[in-house]
Image: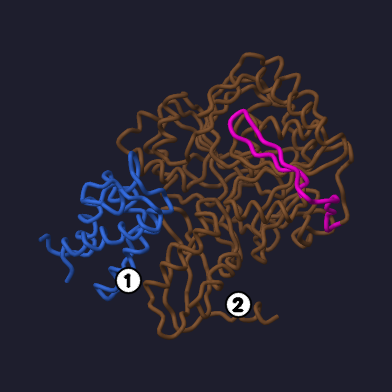
Amino acid sequence: MNFWLHERFKKFNTKPALVGTWGEFSYADLANLTEKIESEFSSLAGKDFTTIGLVGDCCPASVAWMIAAERLQHWVVPLVDHAQETADKLNQIHAQWVVITEGSTWKIYPRAAVGKLELSNNQSIPVSHAGLVLFSSGTSGNPKAMLQDLSNLLSTYESRHENSLVILSLLGFDHIGGINTILGGLAAGSLIVIPESRAPDQVADVIKKHHVAILPATPTFLNLLLLATFDRLADLASLRLITYGTEPMPEALLARLHQVLPSVRLIQTFGTTETGILKTESPEVDSNFLRINDPNVEWKIVNDELWLKTRTQIRGYLNASNEKFTDDGWFMTGDKVEVGPNDTLRILGRSGEMINVGGQKLMPTEVESVILSVPGVVDCRVFGEKNAMVGQTVAADIIPQAGQNWETLRALIRQTCRQTLSTYKVPTRLNLVTAISTNRLKKQRTS
Amino acid sequence: MITRAQILTLILNRLKMLGEELHKPALVQATEQTRLFGDKADLDSMGLVTLIADLEYDLQQHVGRSVSLVDEKAMSRLTSPFRRVDYLADYLVELLNVPKS
Protein backbone atom coordinates (compact mmCIF):
# COMPACT_ATOMS: atom_id res chain seq x y z
CA MET A 1 0.00 0.00 0.00
CA ASN A 2 1.27 3.47 -0.87
CA PHE A 3 0.63 5.58 2.25
CA TRP A 4 2.83 8.34 0.87
CA LEU A 5 0.33 9.33 -1.85
CA HIS A 6 -2.51 9.94 0.58
CA GLU A 7 -0.19 11.88 2.88
CA ARG A 8 0.95 13.97 -0.06
CA PHE A 9 -2.66 14.71 -1.03
CA LYS A 10 -3.26 15.99 2.50
CA LYS A 11 -0.10 18.09 2.36
CA PHE A 12 -1.08 19.62 -1.00
CA ASN A 13 -4.44 20.31 0.68
CA THR A 14 -6.27 23.15 -1.11
CA LYS A 15 -4.09 23.04 -4.24
CA PRO A 16 -6.25 22.24 -7.27
CA ALA A 17 -5.77 18.63 -8.43
CA LEU A 18 -8.33 18.00 -11.16
CA VAL A 19 -10.48 20.28 -13.25
CA GLY A 20 -13.10 19.29 -15.80
CA THR A 21 -16.75 19.76 -16.68
CA TRP A 22 -17.61 18.64 -13.13
CA GLY A 23 -15.71 21.59 -11.63
CA GLU A 24 -12.44 21.88 -9.73
CA PHE A 25 -11.26 19.34 -7.17
CA SER A 26 -8.52 20.06 -4.67
CA TYR A 27 -6.08 17.48 -3.32
CA ALA A 28 -8.00 17.57 0.00
CA ASP A 29 -11.25 16.84 -1.89
CA LEU A 30 -9.57 13.89 -3.60
CA ALA A 31 -8.22 12.55 -0.28
CA ASN A 32 -11.70 12.81 1.27
CA LEU A 33 -13.30 11.10 -1.73
CA THR A 34 -10.79 8.24 -1.48
CA GLU A 35 -11.50 7.76 2.23
CA LYS A 36 -15.25 7.78 1.60
CA ILE A 37 -14.92 5.11 -1.10
CA GLU A 38 -12.69 2.94 1.12
CA SER A 39 -15.18 3.03 3.95
CA GLU A 40 -18.28 2.55 1.77
CA PHE A 41 -16.83 -0.30 -0.28
CA SER A 42 -15.35 -2.11 2.73
CA SER A 43 -18.69 -2.16 4.49
CA LEU A 44 -20.45 -3.33 1.32
CA ALA A 45 -17.99 -5.92 0.00
CA GLY A 46 -15.98 -6.86 3.08
CA LYS A 47 -12.21 -7.01 3.20
CA ASP A 48 -11.72 -10.08 1.00
CA PHE A 49 -9.99 -9.72 -2.33
CA THR A 50 -12.20 -8.74 -5.24
CA THR A 51 -12.02 -7.48 -8.83
CA ILE A 52 -13.66 -4.13 -9.62
CA GLY A 53 -14.62 -3.03 -13.13
CA LEU A 54 -14.32 0.77 -13.15
CA VAL A 55 -16.50 2.09 -15.97
CA GLY A 56 -16.30 5.77 -16.81
CA ASP A 57 -14.13 8.53 -18.19
CA CYS A 58 -11.38 10.15 -16.19
CA CYS A 59 -13.06 12.14 -13.40
CA PRO A 60 -12.49 12.65 -9.64
CA ALA A 61 -14.52 9.51 -8.80
CA SER A 62 -12.56 7.31 -11.27
CA VAL A 63 -9.23 8.55 -9.92
CA ALA A 64 -10.32 8.17 -6.29
CA TRP A 65 -11.61 4.64 -6.97
CA MET A 66 -8.31 3.59 -8.49
CA ILE A 67 -6.41 4.94 -5.48
CA ALA A 68 -8.89 3.41 -3.02
CA ALA A 69 -8.64 0.01 -4.76
CA GLU A 70 -4.88 0.20 -4.34
CA ARG A 71 -5.22 0.91 -0.63
CA LEU A 72 -7.73 -1.94 -0.26
CA GLN A 73 -5.46 -4.31 -2.26
CA HIS A 74 -8.07 -5.22 -4.85
CA TRP A 75 -7.75 -5.54 -8.61
CA VAL A 76 -9.16 -2.65 -10.59
CA VAL A 77 -10.03 -2.68 -14.30
CA PRO A 78 -10.59 0.78 -15.87
CA LEU A 79 -12.92 0.58 -18.89
CA VAL A 80 -13.98 3.50 -21.08
CA ASP A 81 -14.91 1.64 -24.26
CA HIS A 82 -17.91 1.13 -26.39
CA ALA A 83 -20.68 -0.46 -24.23
CA GLN A 84 -20.56 -3.85 -26.00
CA GLU A 85 -16.77 -4.09 -25.64
CA THR A 86 -17.00 -3.12 -21.96
CA ALA A 87 -19.51 -5.91 -21.26
CA ASP A 88 -17.25 -8.46 -22.98
CA LYS A 89 -14.24 -7.33 -20.98
CA LEU A 90 -16.09 -7.45 -17.65
CA ASN A 91 -16.98 -11.06 -18.43
CA GLN A 92 -13.46 -11.97 -19.39
CA ILE A 93 -11.87 -10.74 -16.19
CA HIS A 94 -14.56 -12.14 -13.86
CA ALA A 95 -15.27 -8.72 -12.35
CA GLN A 96 -17.29 -9.17 -9.17
CA TRP A 97 -18.22 -5.51 -8.88
CA VAL A 98 -18.93 -2.80 -11.42
CA VAL A 99 -18.54 0.81 -10.44
CA ILE A 100 -19.91 3.40 -12.85
CA THR A 101 -18.39 6.80 -12.28
CA GLU A 102 -19.46 10.27 -13.32
CA GLY A 103 -17.88 13.43 -11.95
CA SER A 104 -17.58 12.94 -8.20
CA THR A 105 -20.38 10.36 -7.99
CA TRP A 106 -20.59 6.62 -8.56
CA LYS A 107 -22.96 3.69 -8.54
CA ILE A 108 -21.88 0.23 -7.39
CA TYR A 109 -23.35 -2.98 -8.83
CA PRO A 110 -22.48 -6.56 -7.85
CA ARG A 111 -21.85 -9.03 -10.69
CA ALA A 112 -22.39 -12.75 -10.68
CA ALA A 113 -18.77 -13.80 -11.03
CA VAL A 114 -16.57 -15.78 -8.71
CA GLY A 115 -12.95 -16.66 -8.28
CA LYS A 116 -9.68 -14.95 -8.97
CA LEU A 117 -8.24 -15.23 -12.44
CA GLU A 118 -4.80 -16.77 -12.60
CA LEU A 119 -1.97 -15.56 -14.79
CA SER A 120 -1.04 -17.79 -17.70
CA ASN A 121 2.60 -17.85 -16.56
CA ASN A 122 1.58 -19.05 -13.07
CA GLN A 123 3.12 -15.95 -11.52
CA SER A 124 1.21 -13.73 -9.13
CA ILE A 125 1.52 -10.38 -7.44
CA PRO A 126 2.16 -10.18 -3.68
CA VAL A 127 -1.10 -10.52 -1.72
CA SER A 128 -0.41 -7.18 -0.06
CA HIS A 129 -0.32 -5.48 -3.49
CA ALA A 130 -3.20 -4.27 -5.64
CA GLY A 131 -3.59 -5.16 -9.30
CA LEU A 132 -4.42 -3.08 -12.36
CA VAL A 133 -5.85 -4.96 -15.33
CA LEU A 134 -5.39 -3.28 -18.72
CA PHE A 135 -6.39 -4.50 -22.16
CA SER A 136 -4.51 -4.31 -25.41
CA SER A 137 -5.16 -5.62 -28.91
CA GLY A 138 -4.55 -9.36 -29.06
CA THR A 139 -3.17 -11.13 -32.12
CA SER A 140 -6.28 -13.30 -32.32
CA GLY A 141 -8.49 -10.20 -32.36
CA ASN A 142 -9.58 -10.84 -28.80
CA PRO A 143 -8.23 -8.06 -26.54
CA LYS A 144 -5.53 -9.30 -24.17
CA ALA A 145 -6.05 -8.70 -20.45
CA MET A 146 -2.82 -8.10 -18.57
CA LEU A 147 -2.11 -7.70 -14.90
CA GLN A 148 0.06 -4.85 -13.66
CA ASP A 149 1.19 -4.64 -10.02
CA LEU A 150 -0.61 -1.36 -9.21
CA SER A 151 1.16 -0.91 -5.86
CA ASN A 152 4.54 -1.31 -7.54
CA LEU A 153 3.55 1.03 -10.40
CA LEU A 154 2.37 3.70 -7.96
CA SER A 155 5.58 3.48 -5.94
CA THR A 156 7.60 4.54 -9.00
CA TYR A 157 6.01 8.00 -8.79
CA GLU A 158 7.10 8.63 -5.19
CA SER A 159 10.32 10.33 -6.34
CA ARG A 160 8.44 13.04 -8.26
CA HIS A 161 9.20 16.56 -7.02
CA GLU A 162 6.43 18.99 -6.28
CA ASN A 163 5.50 21.47 -8.98
CA SER A 164 2.51 23.58 -9.92
CA LEU A 165 2.39 22.83 -13.62
CA VAL A 166 -0.86 22.45 -15.49
CA ILE A 167 -1.09 19.21 -17.47
CA LEU A 168 -3.76 18.27 -19.98
CA SER A 169 -4.80 14.61 -19.89
CA LEU A 170 -5.77 13.46 -23.34
CA LEU A 171 -5.16 9.73 -23.36
CA GLY A 172 -7.87 7.51 -21.92
CA PHE A 173 -8.10 6.39 -18.31
CA ASP A 174 -7.85 2.79 -19.56
CA HIS A 175 -4.55 3.49 -21.33
CA ILE A 176 -1.16 3.13 -19.65
CA GLY A 177 -0.17 6.52 -21.05
CA GLY A 178 -3.27 8.20 -19.59
CA ILE A 179 -2.80 6.52 -16.21
CA ASN A 180 0.87 7.56 -16.22
CA THR A 181 -0.12 11.20 -16.81
CA ILE A 182 -2.70 11.14 -13.99
CA LEU A 183 -0.70 9.28 -11.34
CA GLY A 184 2.58 11.04 -12.17
CA GLY A 185 0.89 14.45 -12.16
CA LEU A 186 -0.95 13.86 -8.88
CA ALA A 187 2.22 12.57 -7.18
CA ALA A 188 3.83 15.92 -8.04
CA GLY A 189 0.93 18.17 -7.03
CA SER A 190 0.23 19.33 -10.59
CA LEU A 191 -3.18 20.46 -11.79
CA ILE A 192 -4.58 17.96 -14.26
CA VAL A 193 -7.10 19.27 -16.77
CA ILE A 194 -9.57 16.80 -18.25
CA PRO A 195 -11.15 18.12 -21.46
CA GLU A 196 -14.81 17.34 -22.13
CA SER A 197 -14.00 16.13 -25.62
CA ARG A 198 -10.85 15.32 -27.57
CA ALA A 199 -11.96 17.40 -30.54
CA PRO A 200 -8.88 19.52 -31.31
CA ASP A 201 -10.70 22.87 -31.38
CA GLN A 202 -12.27 22.19 -28.00
CA VAL A 203 -8.95 21.05 -26.57
CA ALA A 204 -7.45 24.35 -27.79
CA ASP A 205 -10.19 26.21 -25.86
CA VAL A 206 -9.27 24.24 -22.72
CA ILE A 207 -5.54 24.92 -23.17
CA LYS A 208 -6.25 28.65 -23.37
CA LYS A 209 -8.72 28.70 -20.48
CA HIS A 210 -6.54 26.79 -18.00
CA HIS A 211 -3.11 27.96 -19.22
CA VAL A 212 -2.02 24.39 -19.88
CA ALA A 213 1.78 24.01 -19.95
CA ILE A 214 2.21 20.30 -20.65
CA LEU A 215 0.39 18.40 -23.37
CA PRO A 216 0.98 14.66 -23.73
CA ALA A 217 -0.47 13.68 -27.12
CA THR A 218 -0.22 11.47 -30.16
CA PRO A 219 1.28 12.74 -33.44
CA THR A 220 -2.17 12.31 -35.00
CA PHE A 221 -3.76 14.54 -32.40
CA LEU A 222 -1.05 17.18 -32.93
CA ASN A 223 -1.61 16.97 -36.69
CA LEU A 224 -5.35 17.56 -36.20
CA LEU A 225 -4.71 20.28 -33.61
CA LEU A 226 -2.69 22.25 -36.17
CA LEU A 227 -5.42 21.67 -38.76
CA ALA A 228 -8.14 22.97 -36.42
CA THR A 229 -6.24 25.91 -34.92
CA PHE A 230 -4.07 27.26 -37.72
CA ASP A 231 -5.78 30.67 -37.44
CA ARG A 232 -5.78 30.80 -33.63
CA LEU A 233 -2.34 29.54 -32.63
CA ALA A 234 -2.16 32.28 -29.97
CA ASP A 235 -4.58 30.13 -27.96
CA LEU A 236 -1.76 27.62 -27.49
CA ALA A 237 0.66 30.24 -26.11
CA SER A 238 0.77 28.73 -22.59
CA LEU A 239 2.21 25.43 -23.86
CA ARG A 240 5.80 24.75 -22.81
CA LEU A 241 6.18 21.05 -23.39
CA ILE A 242 4.53 18.56 -25.72
CA THR A 243 5.29 14.89 -25.22
CA TYR A 244 4.29 12.61 -28.04
CA GLY A 245 4.13 8.87 -28.49
CA THR A 246 2.04 5.73 -29.17
CA GLU A 247 2.67 5.93 -32.93
CA PRO A 248 5.58 6.99 -35.16
CA MET A 249 6.08 10.75 -35.63
CA PRO A 250 6.34 11.77 -39.31
CA GLU A 251 9.36 14.05 -39.78
CA ALA A 252 7.33 16.58 -41.80
CA LEU A 253 4.88 16.96 -38.92
CA LEU A 254 7.68 17.37 -36.38
CA ALA A 255 9.18 20.13 -38.54
CA ARG A 256 5.80 21.84 -38.86
CA LEU A 257 5.28 21.73 -35.07
CA HIS A 258 8.68 23.35 -34.52
CA GLN A 259 7.85 25.99 -37.06
CA VAL A 260 4.46 27.02 -35.69
CA LEU A 261 5.19 26.46 -31.97
CA PRO A 262 8.83 27.57 -31.69
CA SER A 263 8.83 28.07 -27.92
CA VAL A 264 7.48 24.60 -27.15
CA ARG A 265 9.85 21.76 -26.28
CA LEU A 266 8.91 18.52 -28.03
CA ILE A 267 9.87 15.25 -26.39
CA GLN A 268 9.15 11.80 -27.72
CA THR A 269 8.02 9.23 -25.17
CA PHE A 270 7.87 5.50 -25.50
CA GLY A 271 5.95 2.88 -23.61
CA THR A 272 3.80 -0.17 -23.93
CA THR A 273 1.02 -1.53 -21.76
CA GLU A 274 3.33 -4.46 -21.00
CA THR A 275 6.29 -2.37 -19.80
CA GLY A 276 4.86 0.95 -18.61
CA ILE A 277 6.06 4.35 -19.85
CA LEU A 278 9.82 4.83 -20.18
CA LYS A 279 11.68 8.04 -19.34
CA THR A 280 13.16 9.30 -22.59
CA GLU A 281 14.83 12.37 -24.03
CA SER A 282 14.94 13.80 -27.54
CA PRO A 283 18.57 14.87 -28.11
CA GLU A 284 17.97 16.70 -31.39
CA VAL A 285 15.00 19.05 -31.72
CA ASP A 286 14.32 18.32 -35.37
CA SER A 287 14.83 14.60 -35.24
CA ASN A 288 12.50 11.84 -34.16
CA PHE A 289 15.32 9.83 -32.61
CA LEU A 290 14.96 9.33 -28.86
CA ARG A 291 17.24 8.14 -26.09
CA ILE A 292 16.00 5.93 -23.25
CA ASN A 293 17.19 7.55 -20.03
CA ASP A 294 15.58 5.52 -17.28
CA PRO A 295 17.35 3.66 -14.46
CA ASN A 296 14.39 1.26 -14.26
CA VAL A 297 14.76 0.13 -17.86
CA GLU A 298 17.06 -2.24 -19.73
CA TRP A 299 16.82 -2.42 -23.51
CA LYS A 300 18.38 -4.22 -26.44
CA ILE A 301 17.76 -4.68 -30.15
CA VAL A 302 17.21 -8.17 -31.50
CA ASN A 303 16.73 -8.50 -35.28
CA ASP A 304 15.80 -4.78 -35.50
CA GLU A 305 13.11 -5.28 -32.83
CA LEU A 306 13.19 -3.43 -29.51
CA TRP A 307 13.27 -5.66 -26.43
CA LEU A 308 12.63 -4.19 -22.98
CA LYS A 309 12.94 -5.24 -19.37
CA THR A 310 11.46 -2.72 -16.91
CA ARG A 311 10.64 -2.34 -13.24
CA THR A 312 7.03 -1.60 -14.15
CA GLN A 313 6.40 -4.49 -16.49
CA ILE A 314 3.24 -6.53 -16.16
CA ARG A 315 3.15 -9.74 -14.15
CA GLY A 316 1.54 -11.58 -17.04
CA TYR A 317 -1.56 -12.09 -19.14
CA LEU A 318 -4.88 -13.34 -17.79
CA ASN A 319 -6.37 -14.63 -21.03
CA ALA A 320 -3.39 -15.11 -23.34
CA SER A 321 -0.08 -16.93 -23.41
CA ASN A 322 3.15 -15.27 -22.38
CA GLU A 323 4.76 -15.72 -25.79
CA LYS A 324 5.77 -12.06 -26.06
CA PHE A 325 8.05 -12.50 -23.06
CA THR A 326 11.26 -14.54 -23.06
CA ASP A 327 11.92 -16.95 -20.19
CA ASP A 328 14.41 -14.49 -18.74
CA GLY A 329 11.85 -11.68 -18.67
CA TRP A 330 12.50 -9.64 -21.83
CA PHE A 331 9.42 -8.18 -23.50
CA MET A 332 9.56 -8.34 -27.30
CA THR A 333 7.80 -5.07 -28.17
CA GLY A 334 7.06 -5.91 -31.81
CA ASP A 335 8.33 -2.43 -32.67
CA LYS A 336 10.96 -2.20 -35.38
CA VAL A 337 13.63 0.38 -34.51
CA GLU A 338 16.56 2.03 -36.19
CA VAL A 339 19.68 2.70 -34.12
CA GLY A 340 21.12 6.21 -34.39
CA PRO A 341 24.27 7.84 -33.00
CA ASN A 342 24.98 7.90 -29.23
CA ASP A 343 22.55 5.17 -28.25
CA THR A 344 19.56 6.88 -29.83
CA LEU A 345 16.66 4.98 -31.39
CA ARG A 346 14.03 5.75 -33.96
CA ILE A 347 10.72 3.90 -33.66
CA LEU A 348 9.69 2.72 -37.12
CA GLY A 349 6.40 1.16 -36.08
CA ARG A 350 4.91 -2.23 -35.62
CA SER A 351 5.98 -5.25 -37.53
CA GLY A 352 3.14 -7.56 -38.42
CA GLU A 353 -0.53 -6.88 -38.93
CA MET A 354 -1.38 -4.55 -36.05
CA ILE A 355 -3.14 -1.37 -37.19
CA ASN A 356 -2.40 1.89 -35.37
CA VAL A 357 -5.12 4.50 -35.87
CA GLY A 358 -3.89 7.73 -34.31
CA GLY A 359 -2.19 5.80 -31.50
CA GLN A 360 -5.09 3.41 -30.87
CA LYS A 361 -4.25 -0.13 -31.87
CA LEU A 362 -6.27 -3.03 -33.14
CA MET A 363 -5.84 -6.35 -34.92
CA PRO A 364 -7.57 -6.98 -38.29
CA THR A 365 -9.30 -10.16 -37.09
CA GLU A 366 -11.37 -8.19 -34.58
CA VAL A 367 -12.97 -6.19 -37.42
CA GLU A 368 -13.06 -9.13 -39.85
CA SER A 369 -15.25 -11.17 -37.53
CA VAL A 370 -17.77 -8.30 -37.35
CA ILE A 371 -17.81 -7.78 -41.14
CA LEU A 372 -18.24 -11.50 -41.76
CA SER A 373 -21.37 -11.44 -39.60
CA VAL A 374 -23.05 -9.03 -42.05
CA PRO A 375 -25.53 -10.81 -44.38
CA GLY A 376 -24.35 -10.50 -47.99
CA VAL A 377 -20.61 -10.70 -47.20
CA VAL A 378 -18.87 -13.79 -48.57
CA ASP A 379 -15.35 -12.99 -47.42
CA CYS A 380 -13.22 -10.06 -46.33
CA ARG A 381 -9.73 -8.95 -45.43
CA VAL A 382 -9.01 -6.03 -43.09
CA PHE A 383 -5.72 -4.16 -43.17
CA GLY A 384 -4.12 -0.87 -42.18
CA GLU A 385 -3.76 1.82 -44.80
CA LYS A 386 -1.32 4.71 -44.55
CA ASN A 387 -3.06 8.04 -43.95
CA ALA A 388 -1.50 11.50 -43.69
CA MET A 389 -4.19 12.65 -41.28
CA VAL A 390 -4.30 9.89 -38.64
CA GLY A 391 -1.23 7.76 -39.39
CA GLN A 392 -3.15 4.67 -40.42
CA THR A 393 -6.80 3.89 -41.06
CA VAL A 394 -8.75 0.65 -41.23
CA ALA A 395 -9.52 -0.55 -44.77
CA ALA A 396 -11.31 -3.71 -45.86
CA ASP A 397 -11.53 -5.72 -49.08
CA ILE A 398 -14.98 -7.26 -49.36
CA ILE A 399 -16.33 -10.06 -51.55
CA PRO A 400 -20.11 -9.64 -51.66
CA GLN A 401 -22.66 -12.29 -52.55
CA ALA A 402 -23.62 -12.34 -56.23
CA GLY A 403 -26.34 -9.81 -57.04
CA GLN A 404 -25.75 -7.83 -53.84
CA ASN A 405 -26.06 -4.03 -54.26
CA TRP A 406 -22.66 -2.64 -53.32
CA GLU A 407 -23.78 0.74 -51.92
CA THR A 408 -26.42 -0.93 -49.74
CA LEU A 409 -23.90 -3.47 -48.47
CA ARG A 410 -21.30 -0.77 -47.75
CA ALA A 411 -23.82 1.14 -45.63
CA LEU A 412 -24.84 -2.02 -43.79
CA ILE A 413 -21.24 -3.01 -43.03
CA ARG A 414 -20.47 0.47 -41.68
CA GLN A 415 -23.65 0.50 -39.60
CA THR A 416 -22.92 -2.94 -38.11
CA CYS A 417 -19.32 -1.96 -37.32
CA ARG A 418 -20.47 1.30 -35.68
CA GLN A 419 -22.92 -0.60 -33.48
CA THR A 420 -20.33 -3.15 -32.36
CA LEU A 421 -16.91 -1.51 -32.41
CA SER A 422 -15.21 1.60 -31.06
CA THR A 423 -15.16 4.42 -33.65
CA TYR A 424 -11.47 4.11 -34.59
CA LYS A 425 -12.01 0.44 -35.54
CA VAL A 426 -14.77 1.17 -38.06
CA PRO A 427 -13.33 0.81 -41.59
CA THR A 428 -13.09 4.13 -43.40
CA ARG A 429 -12.49 2.47 -46.77
CA LEU A 430 -14.39 -0.52 -48.11
CA ASN A 431 -13.18 -2.00 -51.39
CA LEU A 432 -15.29 -4.25 -53.61
CA VAL A 433 -13.09 -7.14 -54.74
CA THR A 434 -13.57 -10.50 -56.43
CA ALA A 435 -10.73 -12.32 -54.68
CA ILE A 436 -8.99 -11.92 -51.32
CA SER A 437 -5.25 -11.54 -51.70
CA THR A 438 -4.41 -13.78 -48.75
CA ASN A 439 -5.77 -17.11 -47.61
CA ARG A 440 -5.11 -16.27 -43.94
CA LEU A 441 -8.78 -15.85 -43.11
CA LYS A 442 -10.04 -19.00 -44.75
CA LYS A 443 -7.35 -20.94 -42.96
CA GLN A 444 -8.39 -19.48 -39.62
CA ARG A 445 -12.04 -20.15 -40.17
CA THR A 446 -11.53 -23.74 -41.17
CA SER A 447 -8.95 -24.56 -38.51
CA MET B 1 -13.98 15.73 -67.19
CA ILE B 2 -15.62 16.58 -63.88
CA THR B 3 -16.89 20.07 -63.06
CA ARG B 4 -16.87 21.97 -59.78
CA ALA B 5 -20.64 21.65 -59.63
CA GLN B 6 -20.36 17.87 -59.95
CA ILE B 7 -17.65 17.79 -57.29
CA LEU B 8 -19.83 19.84 -54.97
CA THR B 9 -22.75 17.46 -55.54
CA LEU B 10 -20.50 14.50 -54.69
CA ILE B 11 -19.35 16.16 -51.44
CA LEU B 12 -22.87 17.13 -50.37
CA ASN B 13 -24.22 13.67 -51.22
CA ARG B 14 -21.55 11.97 -49.17
CA LEU B 15 -22.12 14.38 -46.27
CA LYS B 16 -25.83 13.63 -46.44
CA MET B 17 -25.20 9.87 -46.27
CA LEU B 18 -22.66 10.28 -43.48
CA GLY B 19 -25.06 12.58 -41.60
CA GLU B 20 -27.74 9.90 -41.79
CA GLU B 21 -25.29 7.21 -40.64
CA LEU B 22 -24.04 9.33 -37.74
CA HIS B 23 -27.43 10.90 -36.91
CA LYS B 24 -26.16 14.43 -37.53
CA PRO B 25 -28.93 16.51 -39.20
CA ALA B 26 -26.56 19.44 -39.90
CA LEU B 27 -24.55 17.20 -42.23
CA VAL B 28 -27.70 15.99 -44.00
CA GLN B 29 -28.54 19.62 -44.82
CA ALA B 30 -24.95 20.65 -45.58
CA THR B 31 -24.24 23.60 -47.88
CA GLU B 32 -21.08 25.08 -49.39
CA GLN B 33 -20.53 27.00 -46.15
CA THR B 34 -20.78 23.96 -43.86
CA ARG B 35 -17.72 23.55 -41.69
CA LEU B 36 -16.09 20.15 -41.95
CA PHE B 37 -13.44 20.18 -39.23
CA GLY B 38 -12.37 22.50 -36.44
CA ASP B 39 -14.50 25.14 -34.71
CA LYS B 40 -18.26 24.44 -34.79
CA ALA B 41 -17.82 21.53 -37.19
CA ASP B 42 -19.97 18.42 -37.09
CA LEU B 43 -17.35 15.89 -38.16
CA ASP B 44 -14.79 14.39 -35.81
CA SER B 45 -11.44 13.20 -37.11
CA MET B 46 -12.67 9.70 -38.04
CA GLY B 47 -15.74 11.22 -39.69
CA LEU B 48 -13.50 13.45 -41.79
CA VAL B 49 -11.26 10.52 -42.73
CA THR B 50 -14.36 8.52 -43.73
CA LEU B 51 -15.69 11.39 -45.86
CA ILE B 52 -12.35 11.67 -47.65
CA ALA B 53 -12.18 7.91 -48.29
CA ASP B 54 -15.76 8.00 -49.66
CA LEU B 55 -14.90 10.93 -51.94
CA GLU B 56 -11.75 9.22 -53.19
CA TYR B 57 -13.95 6.26 -54.16
CA ASP B 58 -16.46 8.52 -55.95
CA LEU B 59 -13.77 10.46 -57.77
CA GLN B 60 -12.11 7.26 -58.91
CA GLN B 61 -15.46 6.20 -60.41
CA HIS B 62 -15.74 9.57 -62.20
CA VAL B 63 -12.22 10.17 -63.45
CA GLY B 64 -11.17 6.54 -63.89
CA ARG B 65 -7.96 6.75 -61.85
CA SER B 66 -7.16 6.61 -58.18
CA VAL B 67 -7.08 9.99 -56.43
CA SER B 68 -5.45 10.68 -53.08
CA LEU B 69 -6.83 13.72 -51.26
CA VAL B 70 -4.63 13.78 -48.18
CA ASP B 71 -0.90 14.21 -48.17
CA GLU B 72 1.63 16.33 -46.29
CA LYS B 73 1.16 19.19 -48.76
CA ALA B 74 -2.59 19.25 -48.19
CA MET B 75 -2.13 19.05 -44.41
CA SER B 76 0.34 21.93 -44.28
CA ARG B 77 -1.62 24.41 -46.42
CA LEU B 78 -2.24 27.73 -44.74
CA THR B 79 -5.95 27.51 -45.53
CA SER B 80 -6.83 23.93 -44.92
CA PRO B 81 -9.03 22.37 -47.62
CA PHE B 82 -10.66 20.27 -44.92
CA ARG B 83 -12.22 23.13 -42.99
CA ARG B 84 -15.23 23.91 -45.15
CA VAL B 85 -17.20 22.32 -48.00
CA ASP B 86 -16.36 25.11 -50.47
CA TYR B 87 -12.63 24.98 -49.61
CA LEU B 88 -12.68 21.24 -50.25
CA ALA B 89 -14.49 21.69 -53.57
CA ASP B 90 -11.94 24.34 -54.66
CA TYR B 91 -9.08 22.07 -53.60
CA LEU B 92 -10.49 19.14 -55.60
CA VAL B 93 -10.89 21.37 -58.66
CA GLU B 94 -7.23 22.32 -58.33
CA LEU B 95 -6.15 18.74 -57.63
CA LEU B 96 -8.00 17.28 -60.58
CA ASN B 97 -7.06 20.23 -62.75
CA VAL B 98 -10.54 20.84 -64.03
CA PRO B 99 -11.93 24.15 -65.28
CA LYS B 100 -13.99 26.19 -62.82
CA SER B 101 -17.64 26.36 -63.91
Residue visible at 63% across and 45% down in the picture: A175
**In this view of the protein, which residue sits in the foreground, B6 or B73?**
B6
* Chain assigned brown: A
Residue visible at 62% across and 13% down in the picture: A14
The location of residue A323, given as percent across then percent down, is 77, 62
- The residue most toward the bottom is A402
Residue visible at 55% across and 47% down in the picture: A289
* Residue A403 can be seen in this image: yes
Q: CA distance from mark 2 to mark 1?
A: 27 Å
The location of residue A211, given as percent across then percent down, is 46, 24
Residue annotated with mark 1: B66
Q: Is residue A353 above or below residue A314?
A: below
Relative to A234, is A214 on the left or the right? right
Total marks shown come to 2
Q: Amino acid at mark 1?
A: Ser
Q: Amino acid at mark 2?
A: Leu
* Segment colored magenta: A95-121
Residue annotated with mark 2: A441
Q: Judging from the image, what secondary structure is the residue with disc 2 in?
A: helix
